[in-house]
Image (cartoon, helix red, strand yellow):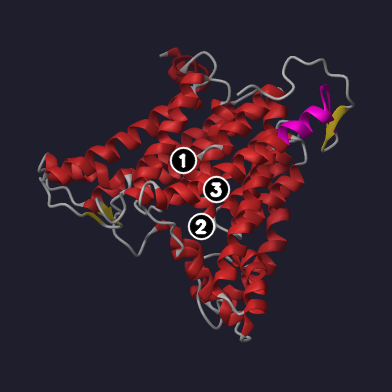
Amino acid sequence: MKPPGKGREKTGEPLTFLGQTFEKTDTKTVRSHLLSLVFVSLATKFLVLVLTPAVFHSFIDLFDIGYLFQNAIPLSQGQIPYLDYSIAYPILVFIPMILALIPALVTQSGMAFIYSFQLLMILCDLGTLLCIYFIGLKISDERTAWYAGLVYATAFSASYFVLTKFDAFPTLLLMGAILFTVYDRKVHGYVSATLGFFAKVFPAVSFPFMILYNAKTTSLSEEVVTAVKVFLPFAVILFIPFLLLRPDHLNTYLFATGATVGVYASTATYTLYTYIHDVAHLGLPAATVSLFMYLLLGLVMLLLLWIGWKDRRKSPVTLLKLTGFAIFAFVFFSKFHSPQYIVWYTPFLALLVAGDLLKTGLFYLVQALAYLEFPLLFGTFYVNLNYLSPAGSAGWYLTLLFFTLEYLALILLFALAVRPEGGFRAAVRNYAPESMRRG
């Protein structure tokens, strides 16, 4: 599919967005791009809804939306969340919950909540699509913006989780933070990232990289102060009162660490543990493997922060690479896993693979493997904490092989997507400490 308007002379009014004018891009072309991308995105979601049960004989998972509905009902009875009852998500989850609850109360129908919530998540996802397009326009040109939007709009595994989970809302806030940052609206970026944190914790990963990026025009200390000034008022309103009244409210923000559960079978940690414990028969416990993975996560994060600090150009592309890879690292090295986490880093991948045939093909392979993981293989080959076939059986080895291929594909995709200009060897020379360069 060719970008609409490609090859035509630009005769319309130049586009102005967030105070920046794009002389080589006219408003009419952008409007045409966005309308076609929205159509493709909606068509992808429709196909996912139809083909998942009809062709693949699988299911549309409504467990999470049902959980949110159950936690929205007490609001209509005058109960206060976190004080009268607990919920596993931060407080801004109640924004889409309340909006979806209104038609449910009017019609006295639980299905009205489900459909309303799905519609809200679709709208959030379309907002993310717009962010991707305008970020692509900023870092390159309208051709890159179009291809990035098209890749994201057709990301069918991510689309499945947009329809069935809550993650499209915090992902929109995260990508809004990146959008504002690359358009030099730094305070807006910090606000959006803060709101994302109070919707679901993972958008907070963007904070250090946004601070390092923004420090190119100020200083690191000044940016830290600015970010704290933005974050604190929201914390005072949305977090501290609940924490003072119910100290266990902190658990809401620690839930994603998986501290209270075992190692999930769909994680890279469990895959590595299976090779060590069941294939090599080394007897290493899962907790030790998990600790090793978290140590690696710490090292990776320190490396990314070092790169962000040492990077002289502070380009928007580097911001995308560092933030996207950091989010992926938290997913990859964690012992706790939910399949919708793919929604978190898919927007970054769409921007980083746009226009490259090999990377785009690998992107769709990862989407296919993620779709196989859930919903197609869940409940048949594995459940949350274990494989369903006996250890050593053909089904067990097939499950292990599948997760091995899935994580290898993800590693390869990210390696290609975040590859620095000049390659990794050149990056090592550029970012290594001076003493190591002499050596």
Residue type at tag 1: Phe
Which quadrant would the N terminus be assigned to in this image? Answer: top right
Residue 27 colored in magenta in the image: yes
Separation (CA) of disc 2 from disc 1? 19 Å
Span colored in magenta: 20-34
Lower position in the chain sequence, tag 2 or tag 1: 2
- Looking at the image, is 405 positioned above or below residue 269? above
Residue 402 colored in magenta in the image: no
Residue at 43 percent of width and 27 percent of height = 362
Q: For residue 169, which quarter of the picture?
A: bottom right
Q: Secondary structure at mark 2?
A: loop
The answer to whether 163 appears left or right of 411 in the picture is: right
Lower position in the chain sequence, tag 3 or tag 1: 3
Q: Are marks 2 and 3 in contact (CB under 8 Å)?
A: no
Residue at 72 percent of width and 62 percent of height = 233
Q: Which residue is mark 1?
A: 328
Residue type at tag 3: Phe
Give neighbour class at mark 2: few <14, some 14-19, many 20+ (Cα, 10 Å): many
Q: Which residue is mark 3?
A: 46
Residue type at tag 2: Lys
Give the image location of residue 122, x and y in percent. Answer: 61, 52
Examine the rendering and report whether any part of residue 229 can be seen: yes
Residue at 58 percent of width and 21 percent of height = 355
Examine the rendering and report whether any part of residue 309 can be seen: no
- Looking at the image, is 263 positioned above or below residue 211? below
Separation (CA) of disc 2 from disc 3? 16 Å
